[in-house]
Amino acid sequence: MITVLIIIVISSSATTVFAVSNLWTISNSGLTQPRSFTLVDSSGTICTNNGTCTLSNKGVSGLSNTITNVPNSALDVTMSRTNATETNTAKKIFSAGAGILGLAVGGVSKTNDYTASSINDLILVDATSRIVTITMPSASVNVGKIYTVVKTDNSLNKVIMKGGGTDTIGGNATKGIFNQYDAYTIFSDGGTDWKIKSHPSDAYSSFWVRGTTANRWYSNAWAQQSFSSGAMTANSLRAYPIVFAKTMTIDQIGMNVTGSPAGGCHVGIYSQNGTSYPANLVSGSDVTLDTSTVGAKLVAFGSPITLFEDNLYFLTYLCQNAITASITNVATSPNILGMSSTLLQNTQATGFSTGQTYGALPSTYGSSGIYLSNNSPPLIVFRISG
């Protein structure tokens, strides 16, 4: 059932004309001091009422009626219509202070290729089964029209937006939407290019390859051609920042032991406290690596871990012994924690360190951590499963 509520405020001399195709109820009975009003059509007065008046055109289409306010009175008139659809192509101008309550845009859901119509506003696309292409109508004949296209699924299939004919979108023939709940909002200024009002994040991590079949692994390093080795500090809880631009699910984590094998290491992920400092251990992310032999040590979580978009996290280790493991270069570490005040020195902070006896990772990082300056982060890797 669709309910349309229209609120009209009529001044002392205002006249409003409306078409009635079914039953309307017009009421001012809610006023502290109800005002009188008169309903008039082309045949004369229908009714005068200080409370509620019901008007019906008995199924006759095209009947015009006029609500005339009693002189020198102020009247709020509420008209409600139930289970009906109104179509009106005329432009409406609202005075200052006027508002539309409970407005819902025209939304459609699609799983296959689709050409948007002029009555669509929001297009929700599920590309689970295939790549889906959404084609826009002609921009030149839809001046002022706004569309929002959203990818609702978490599959690897992209949603493609394209202009109709030779039209473009933001100057390009097509635009792609790759991640769940990413969206483009576009509008037409009457030309042949749909202008982009808002668009998904273009952070590099937005495009990380997902899926266990792809089997791609990532770390917090921006780029790396080769890895060196370095000693892990025993009984030191060390945390290194990484940003997730999009919500992603990871199913495995690990390190690569290159020398001095002994004991074990815990690795896990901490969230941040709002000041770019590690705070709480992400539930289920603490795993134990057997570092008593050399080689890649990759361990699956008990269940996949979801890390949320636009958030800073910390890849963290706690080792029992000073094993040697693969490390990245300071130059490839994200400059999130900044440098010291002596900017002429190469003192980029790459993480935090706090003393911690070897064992399970604590639920909170603690407040005594210090910056690690020019400390090459260990190569803690993870696999994105979805």
Image: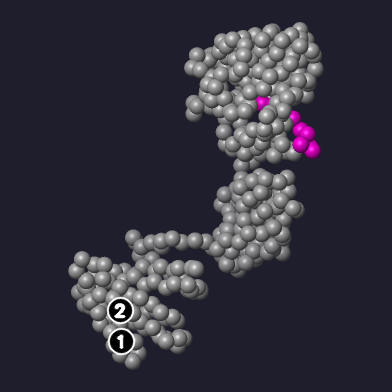
Magenta residues (range): 212-220
- Mark nearest the camera among 2 and 1 is 2
Amino acid marked by disc 1: Ile
* Residue 326, x across and y down, in percent: 74, 17
What is the basis of the colouring in this image? one colour
Asked whether the residues under the numbered discs 2 and 1 touch, taking CB atoms below 8 Å apart as contact, a structural biologist would say: yes
Give the position of the C terminus as an image quadrant: top right
Name above or below for residue 333 compared with residue 132.
above
Give the residue at the far front of this rendering. 302
Q: Please name the residue shown 57% across and 33% down the image.
A: 311
Q: Please name the residue shown 25% across and 82% down the image.
A: 48
Choose the circle earlier in sequence order: 2 or 1: 1
User: Residue 46 got which mark?
Assistant: 1
Q: Quadrant of residue 243?
A: top right
User: Residue 53 got which mark?
Assistant: 2
Q: Quadrant of residue 318?
A: top right
User: Residue 348 got which mark?
Assistant: none
Q: How many marks?
A: 2
* Residue 365, x across and y down, in percent: 54, 19
* Residue 322, x across and y down, in percent: 69, 8
Name above or below for residue 247 compared with residue 45.
above
